[in-house]
Amino acid sequence: MNALTQSWIDIGTLSDIPVRGARCVRYNDLTIAIFRTVDDQIYALEDKCPHRNGPLSQGIVHDGCVTCPLHNWIISLETGEATGADKGRTAVYPVRLEGDRLLLSVDPMKPTSDG
Amino acid sequence: MNKENLVIIGNGMAPGRMLEYLLEADPHRYDITIFNAEPRVNYNRLMLSPVLSGEKTYEDIITHDDDWYAAHGITLHKACKVTEIDRAGKTVTAESGVTQPYDRLVIATGSSPFIIPLPGKDLDGVLTYRDLDDVDNMLLAARDGGKAVVIGGGLLGLEAAAGLKAQGMDVTVLHLMPTLMERQLDTAAGYLLEKAFEELGVTVITKANSQEILGANGKVTGIKLDDGTELHASIIVMAVGIRPSSELAKLCGLDVNRGILVGDDMRTSDPDIFALGECVEHRDQCYGLVAPLYEMAKVISDQLLGKESEYTGSVTATKLKVTGIDLYSAGDFAEADDREEIVLRDGAAGIYKRLVLKDNRIIGAVLYGETADGPWFFDLVKKQTDITQMRETLIFGQAYQGASSVDPSLAVAALPDDAEICGCNGICKAQIVGKIKEHDLTTLDDVRAHTKASSSCGTCTGLVEQIMALTLGDDYNPAAVQPMCGCTDLGHDEVRRLIKSRKLKSIPAVMQELEWKTSCGCAKCRPALNYYLVSDWPDEYADDYQSRFINERAHANIQKDGTYSVVPRMWGGQTSAEELRAIADVVDKFDIPTVKVTGGQRIDMLGIRKDDLPAVWADLGKVGFVSGHAYAKGLRTVKTCVGTDWCRFGTQDSTGLGVRIEKFMWGSWTPAKVKMAVSGCPRNCAEATCKDVGVVCVDSGFEIHFAGAAGLDIKGTEVLGVVKTEDDALEHIVALVQMYREQGHYLERIYKWAKRIGYDEVRRQILDDADKRKQYFDRFVFSQKFAQHDPWSERASGKEKHEFKPLATVAMEPAQ
């Protein structure tokens, strides 16, 4: 039985995450980073840089991107894709705001671009 | 063959330019001697306002340095005032007694500021605004803050007012006429300008008639107006105009009216004597703007070479150089019956444009708020172009004529070859394009050097860059200064200077005021700006943790697997049984996989999970450990040897000094990491001679070293000097680090910074100048009041809790 498929999990409130920052959600062995941008957009990515698995949640958040703390790859929060000359993608998870509550789905989204 | 003697009296911008023309045409024609009453080389007087506001330094505005004169074989007498011209004997004699014969003489004595003969005009604190000494005096007065009054609401007065405001003074402008800059602006533009100055925080009083300057004990205290108003002020700047300096010419019997009279050939009533610049009166006109002076310079250069050349007068244009205010005016704009005008107003955008027409030709233009079309209108004025065809759209500017695009580079591409680009130097488009092609010029500095375009007031820089882009195509790389990052075109130095001069105290303020191209910066500029603001405004700036690299946010060093390492501070590299026991217990309790001794004499515990950090710090804190800042762009370690405590060679208490330095300086943020060492004797066991700052103790005292490197680069230190006592050593080291904190680019280590600004400059400010050293020292001490808090104990007690805890832990359970 896969009871959690497509269901939304309440993980906290918007104010729990610093503006231009991130917090992590642990889901068994998986860590998902929840990002909040300067204009209060919320994104969720697996907390692993496609380069060398650096914890993206520890990076600096700027505009719609995060810079990985290990080797400065810049990852798009919306698509999970590396930007610039770097190539790679990290998993993106659906997350939404309902009132002040943050709801996360642990089913990753399909890549949107055709690469 | 003997060369003829050319003697020049005065060394301002006009004779400087004349020499360039002359030397380019024929470098060997004359033996040249210059007498300059100012004690300096030739600098760009137009740029005094940016120096006053702090946006540029004196070095930035030098046109010809000492080497230039030497290279051209020119004798320059500095601080040497000529007192007599003997026309019969053809010699000039200076105050110092030097006498110099001439065959040709150029008088370029410039002008002097007009001093209103008010009671109190000789009080200490009454200044003028004319040369670098005036700027220095104003900057000195501004250091103490307080109030300033500027008399005169013309170009110079307003630039002085804006500069003093930028330096933090409370400024009032007194202007005799009903609106500002009435000679260049109509009343509507004058009103907009007054409003803009009020918004800058400068008080403007028009129709203000000064009656008396008030003082006490020989110093200015204020000013009284004829309506009884009294204003307090610690300085009063008179900027009401200039008058030609023609006394010397009068003394030797040349024809003089307001200025020295010249004909179209620029010769005075004595054909072997020319007059040039602001001291000249030509066809009833005296000029104070640079463009006409350069035109005169060209004519004299031609005449000196025996060529036919005439000066027939100039139409002038004015641009106000106050950051944030765009104002341009050219030609004649008084109202008259035979004149028509076209006006465009956009109140919301703060734009006002007015063109004055006569017989279908533009004779005057005033632009406020948007001045990009100024040079184009000025060109139409000078050429007396018939504008009938484009009358309907004329006021919208060049981009609307014919072509539909408003892309500025297309507008530049569409300019005719003879369109004037640089008004100061009279350089047209074709000359710039020609020089770029001829010499393969690729940088703005090169183009300035070869064409002079954009080298005076600099307001045409954008146009010149567009011409370079058009001419060079993909070969053009506009970055003359390496920008901080892709979010801005400004370099680190400019950003640091502007943060200070414009009192920017938050990251959003910097990004807004300096026109950042991204909404909230990037991982390169944000940590840099955060550091600059912490360093410049220690008591006022609220540290932005989200703009710090993770190590400085988590106060530990991130490792490749996302765990952290922790290094407690061991002052001067000393530890104890109690401390070591606490470390052993923490290693056991948190199952820390690796313990390592570092190069800076510390113990590093690696592989700690982030969630455990506050608990690790709490345990370490119990025996007195504080953060070792092994993660910081800040003071890391002071390594020591055992010195006179134990060592049979030790000459001083090196351990004690190391501990003292570390206790004094820990917690301070710096542009990049700072590692130090103190060795007790020249055997140098603490390896002080490859550190950012090092001390080698000797019998007679302490030899202070700086700018070493032992990482990516390897470099031995430079010696700052030897001082006698421990107190002296501490003061010098602290001052040196503070100088670096104030000037370094983010991530630039001390050895790179010191090389960039020059080792001698560091010695001059830190070793030779006791006042300066003390000021640096005091500023460091002040900033430490806000920096010396142990981040570990704060976080062990709950600060920034969210940083160390997951938002949520979700277990995979059957549906509830």
Image (cartoon, helix red, strand yellow):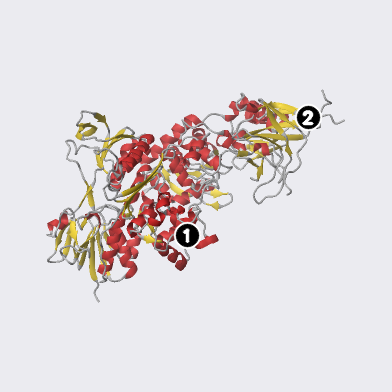
- What's the CA distance linking mark 1 and mark 2? 60 Å
> On screen, B649 above or below B18?
above
**Position of residue B350 measured from the top left corner of the image (x, y, whole percent):** 41, 40
Q: Nearer the viewer, mark 1 or mark 2?
A: 1
Image position of A2 (left or right of B156): right
Do we see residue B661 in this rendering?
no
Residue A7 coordinates in the image, percent (x, y): 78, 29
- Specify the label residue A32 is tagged with: none
- Label 2 sits on what residue type? Ser
User: Mark 1 — residue?
Assistant: B413
Query: Does residue B72 appear to the left or right of A53 in the view shown?
Result: left
- Residue at position x 50%, y 55% from top? B478
The quarter of the picture where the N terminus of chain B appears is bottom left
Front position in the image: B246 or B759: B246
Q: Residue B120 or B584: which is nearer the viewer? A: B120
Q: Residue at x 59, y 51 (%)?
A: B712
| Chain at tag 2 | A
Asked whether, in this view, residue A93 is left or right of residue B48, the answer is: right
Q: Is residue B21 above or below residue B485?
A: below
Say which mark, if any, is on residue A7: 2
Q: Residues within 10 Å of mark 2 (few under 14, many from 20)?
A: few
